[in-house]
Image: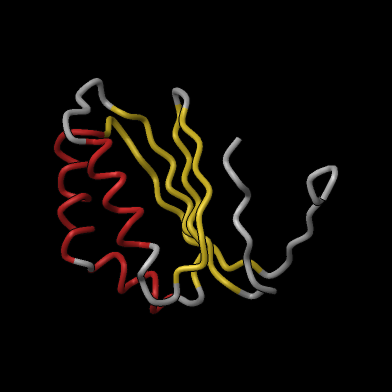
Amino acid sequence: MPPIATTPSPPYYAVIFTSLKSPEDDGYSQMADRMVELVERQEGFLGFESAREELGITVSYWKDEASIKSWKAHVEHKEAQKMGKSKWYEAYTIRIAKVEREYSLAPRGS
């Protein structure tokens, strides 16, 4: 089971990427791995959670809106966006939200 992202006390931002993949996935896994490698070094990035079945959902967490804009403009991320639109996704939606509250249940045995 993938880990739940550890985030700071609110406020911070969440970018919610919901997608339907196309049957074409040549190069997708390699690009996804590269994006994780890059985003983890991006200023203001706090973490992410991702799940994929028929519908894919990735939520990334950010310190502020400027950090989100900087990632969107990153040259390699722009190439991934272009490939996603032309090749890898049937449809997607991106939502950006300000997180003002959070609460959680720690895993049993923690």
State the count of labels.
0
Task: Say above or below: 51 vs 80.
Answer: above
Find residue 71 and report its image quarter.
bottom left
Find residue 93 and report its image quarter.
top left
Residue 15, image x and y in percent? 47, 58
Identity of the residue furthest to the front in this view: 109
Q: Residue at x 50, y 54 (%)?
A: 48
Find residue 6 and report its image quarter.
bottom right
Q: Quick one: 109 or 23, which is closer to the camera?
A: 109
Residue 11, image x and y in percent? 64, 75
Task: Say above or below: 97 vs 89.
Answer: below
Task: Say above or below: 19 vs 80.
Answer: above
Q: Quick one: 20 or 37, which is closer to the camera?
A: 37
Q: Is residue 49 left or right of residue 87?
A: right
Residue 76, image x and y in percent? 18, 59
Q: Is residue 101 left or right of residue 59?
A: right
Q: How is the image coloured?
A: secondary structure
Q: Residue at x 46, y 54 (%)?
A: 95
| Quarter containing the N terminus | top right
Q: Residue at x 48, y 51 (%)?
A: 16
Q: Is residue 46 left or right of residue 108?
A: left
Residue 5, image x and y in percent? 60, 55
